[in-house]
Image (tube, rainbow, N blue to C red):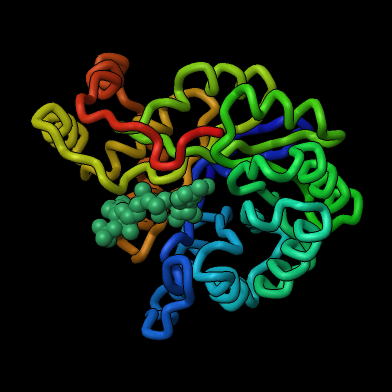
Amino acid sequence: MRFVTAKGDVRIPVLGMGTWCFGGRTEHDAANDDKSQISALRKGIECGFTLIDTAEYYASGYAEELIGRAIEGYDRQQLFITSKVWKSNASKERVLRACENSLKRLKTDYLDCFLYHHFNPEIPLEETIAALNLLVEQGKCRSIGVSNFSAALLRKALQYSNVPIVINQVHCSLAVREALEDLQKYCREEKVVLQAWRPVRDLEETPECRTLCRKYGISFPQLALAWLLNLPDIAVITAMKDLRHLSENMAALEIPLAPEDMEILNNYPFRRPCGVPLA
Ligand SMILES: NC(=O)c1ccc[n+]([C@@H]2O[C@H](COP(=O)([O-])OP(=O)(O)OC[C@H]3O[C@@H](n4cnc5c(N)ncnc54)[C@H](OP(=O)(O)O)[C@@H]3O)[C@@H](O)[C@H]2O)c1
């Protein structure tokens, strides 16, 4: 696995496993196929994917329970687990409680990174960031991050924080580029890793993409991932449901796209705004 290094020498695996829709959507789905999702996570760890991304919001905490079961028996030190506190839990007391609950569900003593999922304008940002800082002091989180933050909001968060903010997780793909404007530049200056979510879902294949897939002998999802992974200092998370996804995506790490092909993809026509607007 390759890494991107954030401030404080925090090494973030460049490609990680997402868990949105694991265990259900916003609620636990009793009909969910837990076994195959646990098995996909375990196979992913065995393939070399050490970063697992989740959130208390995913299936109301059940995605974290599945991860807790999946990581049993693996060396915790080799994994990089990120979870996120939902916006309704952004007050100091609730952030601390949310972290405890995530740790219990994940059956672990610490998170590698704990992210503020979406900014809640009703709670002062300073208060949420101070609570995240306290969790680092207490050793419950090794680092902290934010998600869906614009450059302006990230600047404020950095001012309030005594510890580095190492990740800003944002919607970013061939079709969704807002984060690649000022935000990417600012993140690089501050050594905050821009981590792209939803890199392959909801993309349309164009004739130019088909030609590139043939040229490199890869699938369209691999091309979409390779484009992101060829951009400087970007990390990516994608939900991988089976061995085919896992092996395709591991291979996508090793696809250096020629500059002229990056240019073709830079001009991918089907653009749309972020699914979650940057706050
Ligand atoms: N911070 C936030 O606000 C936020 C928001 C959303 C997501 N996230 C995180 O980002 C992660 C990724 O986003 P996402 O799950 O919405 O979308 P994604 O990873 O872009 O899409 C995953 C889906 O794409 C399809 N796919 C086809 N080929 C694939 C391949 N080679 N590898 C992986 N998927 C392939 C699969 O569906 P089929 O098998 O049906 O084709 C798969 O379920 C989430 O799981 C979550 O951890 C964060």
Query: At 42% from the left edge and 85% from the top edge, which residue is drawn?
Result: 30
Within the image, what quadrant is residue 208 found in?
A: top left
> Seen in the image, is 246 located left or right of residue 132?
left
Outermost residue, front direction?
A: 122
> Seen in the image, is 172 located left or right of residue 195?
left
Total labels: the figure holds 0
> Seen in the image, is 236 located left or right of residue 208?
right
Query: At 72% from the left edge and 74% from the top edge, which residue is drawn?
Result: 104
Q: Nearer the viewer, residue 268 or 161?
A: 161
Q: Give x and y (percent) for residue 248.
A: 32, 51
Q: Give x and y (percent) for residue 197.
A: 45, 44
- Seen in the picture, residue 79 relative to 71 is either above or below; the reply is above
Let me know if residue 12 appears in the view. no
Query: At 46% from the left edge and 36% from the top edge, which residue is drawn?
Result: 277
Outermost residue, right direction?
A: 137
Let me know if residue 15 appears in the view. yes
The C terminus lies in quadrant: top right
Q: Give x and y (percent) for residue 95.
A: 76, 56
Q: Which of 39 and 132 is in front in this view?
A: 132
Query: At 66% from the left edge and 71% from the top edge, which residue is drawn?
Result: 106
Q: Nearer the viewer, residue 263 or 125?
A: 125
Q: Give x and y (percent) for residue 48.
A: 51, 55
> Seen in the image, is 147 located left or right of residue 126?
left
Q: Which of 110 and 93 is in front in this view?
A: 93
Outermost residue, left direction?
A: 207
